[in-house]
């Protein structure tokens, strides 16, 4: 059994949620006519590279939480990617990461209470150590897992305070120094999260600022240092870097 097989066995699911509803305002100077995840990278939309990466790991159900110019995403992918199924959950008004997930969990009755779901930002490229992630899932199946990465200089992202037992104990702002950052990938069970959303009266809010602090206070958030490579495409400079990375490393075998 290879590392990806172990990962899928411990995940106990073949489902992934991708947050692809953002406006992508910082990327407008170079990508203005499509949603940010549909930015062209080496002749294919970035989102297609992302879906294929996780498809190769065994994911067969992709839930796309869409909003801005969602018809472009829906028209391109339709309901299938190879033999995987694609489902869409649309916000008429952009609801933020928290509002989008709240809408998804309230309106999706197909999820089992005890199956783990991967949640990920649809504008981020991650290369994951499947062996480390599989081990983290096995050891922390009743927790919310955040895939994290240590970076030498943090001027853009929130910093996570992680103790020696890999418990996330606090979130703070960017500190312009070495930091442990949230990669935007989470794994958790529906049963862990569904009641949390009832505590938030708003329909538009951030998962990172409204939900994560509640879970951290309850001491049920763990970090997994499984991210080998991290890059979001939110700025023109990083979009160019991502193009270079995928051109060198992405195998066009489908």
Image (tube, rainbow, N blue to C red):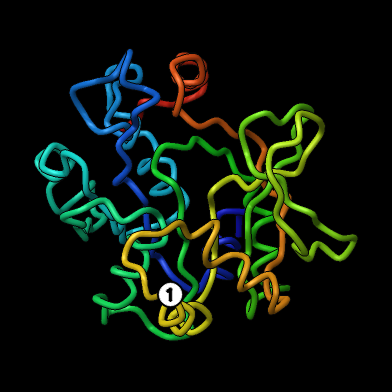
Give the number of callouts. Answer: 1
Disc 1 element: loop
Q: Is residue 61 above or below residue 106?
A: above
Q: Is residue 187 above or below residue 67?
A: below
Look at 90% across and 60% down and name the residue there. Answer: 164
Which residue sits furthest right? 164
Q: Is residue 253 above or below residue 129?
A: above
Q: Quadrant of the C terminus?
A: top left
Rendered image quadrant of residue 231? top right
Direction from residue 40 to residue 75 in the image, left or right: left
Front one among 84 and 72: 72
The x and y percentages for residue 148 are 68, 48
Look at 31% across and 61% down and name the residue there. Answer: 61
Which residue sits furthest front? 201
Front one among 39 and 96: 96
Look at 55% across and 58% down and name the residue there. Answer: 209
Q: Residues within 10 Å of mark 1 (few under 14, many from 20)?
A: some
Q: Quadrant of the N terminus?
A: bottom right
Look at 33% across and 59% down and name the residue there. Answer: 60
The x and y percentages for residue 153 are 76, 27
The x and y percentages for residue 97 are 40, 55
Front one among 246 and 217: 217
Rendered image quadrant of residue 20? top left
Rendered image quadrant of residue 16? bottom left
The x and y percentages for residue 80 are 18, 51
Residue at label 1? 200
């Amino acid at each position: 059994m290879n590392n990806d097989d172990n990962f899928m066995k411990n995940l106990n699911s073949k489902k992934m949620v991708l947050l692809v509803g953002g406006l992508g305002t910082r990327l407008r100077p170079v990508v203005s006519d499509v949603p940010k995840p549909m930015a062209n990278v080496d002749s294919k939309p970035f989102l297609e590279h992302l879906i294929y990466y996780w498809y190769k790991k065994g994911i067969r159900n992709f839930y796309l939480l869409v909003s801005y110019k969602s018809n472009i995403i829906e028209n391109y992918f339709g309901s299938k990617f190879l033999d995987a199924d694609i489902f869409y959950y649309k916000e008429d008004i952009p609801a933020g990461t928290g509002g989008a997930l709240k809408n998804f969990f309230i309106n999706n009755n197909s999820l089992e209470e005890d199956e783990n779901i991967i949640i990920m930002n649809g504008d981020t490229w991650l290369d994951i150590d499947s062996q480390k992630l599989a081990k983290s899932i096995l050891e922390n199946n009743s927790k919310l897992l955040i895939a994290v990465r240590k970076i030498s200089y943090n001027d853009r992202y929130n910093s996570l305070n992680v103790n020696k037992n890999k418990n996330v104990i606090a979130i703070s702002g960017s500190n312009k120094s070495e930091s442990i950052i949230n990669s935007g990938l989470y794994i958790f069970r529906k049963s862990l999260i569904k009641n949390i959303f009832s505590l938030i009266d708003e329909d538009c809010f951030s998962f990172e600022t409204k939900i994560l602090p509640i879970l951290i206070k309850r001491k049920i958030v763990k970090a997994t240092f499984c991210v080998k490579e991290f890059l979001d495409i939110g700025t023109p400079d990083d979009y160019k870097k991502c193009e270079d990375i995928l051109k060198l490393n992405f195998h066009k075998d489908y």
